[in-house]
Structure formats: C-alpha cells, structure tokens
Image (cartoon, rainbow, N blue to C red):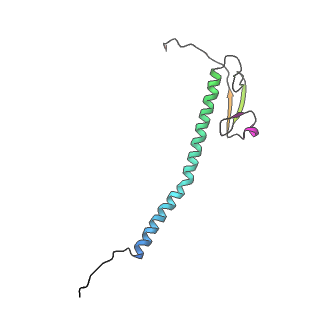
Amino acid sequence: MKRSTVSTAAFSLVELTLAIGVAAFALIAVFGLMPVGVQTNRNATSQTAASNIIASVIADMRATLGSTSVQYRIQFGTAKTLFFDGAGACSISAVAAESRINCRARITRAIRRKWNGSCAA
C-alpha cells in the first residue's frame, strides 16, 4: 500500500491572535481620527459659507447706486448686524435665523471709478 503524504498548511493560533491585534490597533487609530476629520469638515463648511455670504454682501454694496443697498438694506455710513443661517438666508434677528454666521457691516464711503484701461502709481 501506498501512503500519501498530504501536508495541510494553516496559521497557528498565535499568528491569528497577532494579526487580529494589529488590525484592531489600526482600526482604533482610524476611528480615533474620525472626530478630528468631522470637526475639520465642519469648520471648512462654515468658512466657505461665511466667505460666500461676505462676497454677496460686498457685491450688494458695490451694486448700490443710492445710499441704501438693495438686497440687505445696509445704509452707507451706518453699522448694521445681519444674521445668517446655515443655508445663507439673511435675517435681522438672531433667533429668527437660528444664526450660525453673524455679519456686521459698516460702509463709510463708497468709491466708484470707471476703468480707463491704465494704471498710474
């Protein structure tokens, strides 16, 4: 009779324990960084919204021909606090807007010039 020698390759219990330990350590490190990533994302979103809001307010002030801006009703020479919610909607009251972003605008003087195609120092 012929004996067949079949060798089965397998991992030992020690090797499996070490592999699970290394994987658990890596997962704990990744999950530990999740709150930092979420907070960074929230800050970036808020800064982007604030940047878009101030760009809108400045564009409104630049487009104003009279003494009061059209969209935000800011009068030149006076200070006005505007409150904005997360979607960028404006309100005069902080409670009504459930505001995340406050914008205080004070425009003292408007300078309007026409571009003549040259610059002088």
Residue at 65 percent across and 23 percent down: it is 61
In this picture, residue 96 sits left or right of residue 39: right
Residue 116, above or below 81:
above
Looking at this rendering, what residue extends furthest in the left direction? 1
Residue 6, above or below 104:
below
The residue stretch that appears in magenta: 85-98
Residue 97 is a magenta residue: yes
Looking at this rendering, what residue extends furthest in the top direction? 116
In this picture, residue 20 sits left or right of residue 10: right
Q: How far from the left and from the top, in percent, is residue 67?
A: 71, 18
Viewport quadrant of the N terminus:
bottom left
In this picture, residue 104 sits left or right of residue 38: right
Depth check: give the residue in front, 106 or 53: 53
Residue at 68 percent across and 38 percent down: it is 85
Could you tell me how many numbered marks the image carries? 0
Q: How far from the left and from the top, in percent, is residue 105?
A: 68, 28
> Based on the displayed image, in which of its 4 quarters is residue 88 positioned?
top right
> Based on the displayed image, in which of its 4 quarters is residue 77 positioned?
top right
Residue 27, above or below 80:
below
Q: How far from the left and from the top, in percent, is residue 113?
A: 58, 14
Residue 88 is a magenta residue: yes
Residue 87, above or below 5:
above
